[in-house]
Amino acid sequence: MAEAYAKYMAKLQSQLESKCGKVKTKQILAEARAHMDEGIEEMMGRGMSRPAAEEAAIARFGDTDSVCKWYAEQHQRPTVWRASRLPLVVIGASVIFWLFQDQIMPDEFLMRFGSLYEFLIRFRSLIVMSSLLALSILLCFRAKRFVSGVIVVSAAGLYGALILGYCLCSVPVKYDRAYGVIAKWGIADELKRVRTQAELDTRQLAVYREGQQVFAPKHEPPGGVGKFRDSRGYLSQIYFGQQDPRMHYILDGRPMSGIYSTYEEARNDWIDQPKRYCAATGRQEIFFVANLLDELAQFRRIEADLPVADSLSIREKLPAFEDDARFPALFFLGFGLIADIGGGVLRTLFEFIKRRRSPGPTIA
């Protein structure tokens, strides 16, 4: 019967090697042999002969196909592609959401949620990105192997693919603090948008300048403040900027809405504002005026540069393309590594607990 026992273990070894590899099979066989020997010793202790105990142990342990399937499910490592494909999809979706969240979940869409609007507008990124990260960690946990190498290669591939795509299909555009890219076929639309926005900003700047002049006196002028007041009260620059008094921001620790009840409050909004360095004028300006002046200067620069951007050499375009491609690639890399490490830690803990609780096929 010892021969049958040896044949059984040899067959099990052959099947395991085809599924789990030689290195893992050595560990699994040692575990299986320990279970078999323990059962044989137990049955011999009950008075059975060695051959009979081996025969009973083989019968109770199960046929090699079933045993191999069970151990393979516990120890088999999937291929790199099979392990990494779903995590890569979710990580890629996370990058896309982060880059285009304003288009995916615009303010108009969030306003439909009524009282939740202010909460969602502040925490939409946190909510969605936390959910995607949790899903990525779960998928990396289920992958049964670390996929950091694939994530690094994918991030590098994304970086290279973006630069190549930009070189073939895009032109650079210089924004306030960074470079961007515009598709070649979108130049005309971008110029139209820039010119339209510049016209709106010019009109808005005129309103802001007029408001500063109107509210310059310490007290309301005898003639009133004209269009800067209606039946509801004094209108702030937010009202003219957004045309929606529901819009607000926090100034000096208190909420500022689009309507004020007193001249003093309105004057504070138009005159006594925090100031910001304005790159367009080179001096300190009231912050909403500085923002508009810098935005106008940027639009004028884009309007001048964009029509000739396609004629620039690749050497001149490359720094802008590299700058724009760097963030998505680094985001992909960092998000993916966090998910993989988190999933790996959970998997290690889970396998440790499972090994202590689940001894595998038993023969008792």
Image (spheres, grey):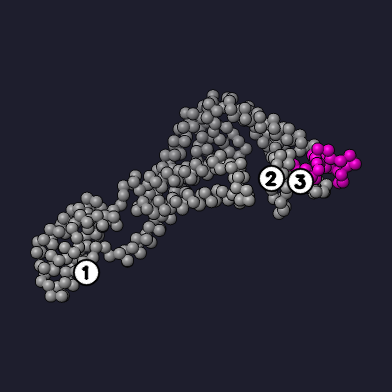
Q: What residue lies at 83% left-to-right and 42% top-to-bottom?
A: 216
Q: Percent from the top left, x then y, of residue 61?
A: 20, 63
Amino acid at circle 3: Ile
Would residue 12 appear left or right of 128 to someone viewing this image?
Answer: left
Amino acid at circle 1: Ala
Q: What residue lies at 13% left-to-right and 65% top-to-bottom?
A: 55
Decide which of tag 2 and tag 3 comes sooner along the chain.
2
**Quarter of the picture holding the N terminus:** bottom left
Is disc 3 placed on a helix, strand or loop? strand
| Residue at mark 2 | 247
Decide which of tag 1 and tag 2 comes sooner along the chain.
2
Distance in Å between CA atoms under marks 2 and 3: 10 Å
Q: Is residue 234 magenta?
A: yes
Total labels drawn: 3
Q: Percent from the top left, x then y, of residue 274?
A: 73, 47
Within 10 Å of disc 3 (Cα), the crowding (few <14, some 14-19, many 20+) is: many
Residue range in magenta is 211-238
Tell me the number on the disc at residue 259. 3
Amino acid at circle 2: Met
Q: Is residue 18 magenta?
A: no
Would residue 280 appear left or right of 228 to someone viewing this image?
Answer: left
Q: What residue lies at 81% left-to-right and 41% top-to-bottom?
A: 229
| Residue at mark 1 | 364
Is disc 2 placed on a helix, strand or loop? loop
Decide which of tag 1 and tag 3 comes sooner along the chain.
3
